[in-house]
Amino acid sequence: MGTFSGSWRIAMDATEATLSMDTWLGPRPLYDVPEITGSFYLRPSGGLAGFALLIPLPSRALRWDAADLDRGGRSRIRLGEREIGAAVSVLCAQVPGERPYYKVVLETAFSSWRLGLPGVPRLRPRRIALTLFSEIYIVKAPG
């Protein structure tokens, strides 16, 4: 990826998040999140350095953030008073073309017992996966 000194715009219409739970029949969607607020932090080279996202769930908002991802950072996930650390898989790839952009895919997984998500059975721990897709467009500087 080349260095870019302009500004960036997150394509909210191309941003979506999903929480799913592993069951004996395979993954089962828990929540398809229609709207997300937050920020991505990009290095001048275009690499994803971090993010801070607010993901609304039916009962309250889930906060997911990370810093220094390009240097081995981990993410934090908070729901109410509970907070956990989790590894995060990051894909941030430049897509060339007439309107170049960066495709961002973030994925993490954690035990349902650790966070206490509503709608998840508490008697048996389940693996919960959180996946986010987004696009970040390059906005040319004026002049």
Image (spheres, rainbow, N blue to C red):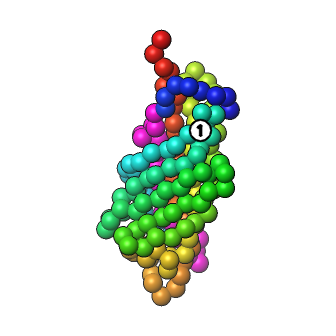
Q: Position of residue 131 (x, y in %)?
A: 53, 57
Q: How many marks?
A: 1
Q: Residue at x 48, y 25 (%)?
A: 139
Q: Main secondary structure of the magenta part?
A: strand
Neighbourhood count class around disc 1 (C-alpha, 10 Å): few under 14, some 14–19, many 20 upward: few
Q: Nearer the viewer, residue 21 or 80?
A: 80
Q: Position of residue 117 (x, y in %)?
A: 42, 73
Give the vertical position of 29 relative to 68 (above or below).
Answer: below
Magenta region = 9-27
Membership of 116 in magenta stretch: no
Membership of 15 in magenta stretch: yes
Q: Position of residue 82 (x, y in %)?
A: 42, 73
Q: Say which amino acid is labelled 1.
A: Arg
**Does dot 1 land on a helix, a strand or a loop?**
loop
Residue at the spot of label 1 = 43
Q: Residue at x 52, y 85 (%)?
A: 124
Q: Position of residue 64 (x, y in %)?
A: 47, 59
User: Which residue sits furthest top?
Assistant: 143
Quarter of the image holding residue 87? bottom right
Q: Is residue 35 visible?
A: yes
Along the horizontal axis of the image, is 56 left or right of 130? Answer: left
Q: Residue at x 40, y 55 (%)?
A: 54
Q: Is residue 103 visible?
A: no
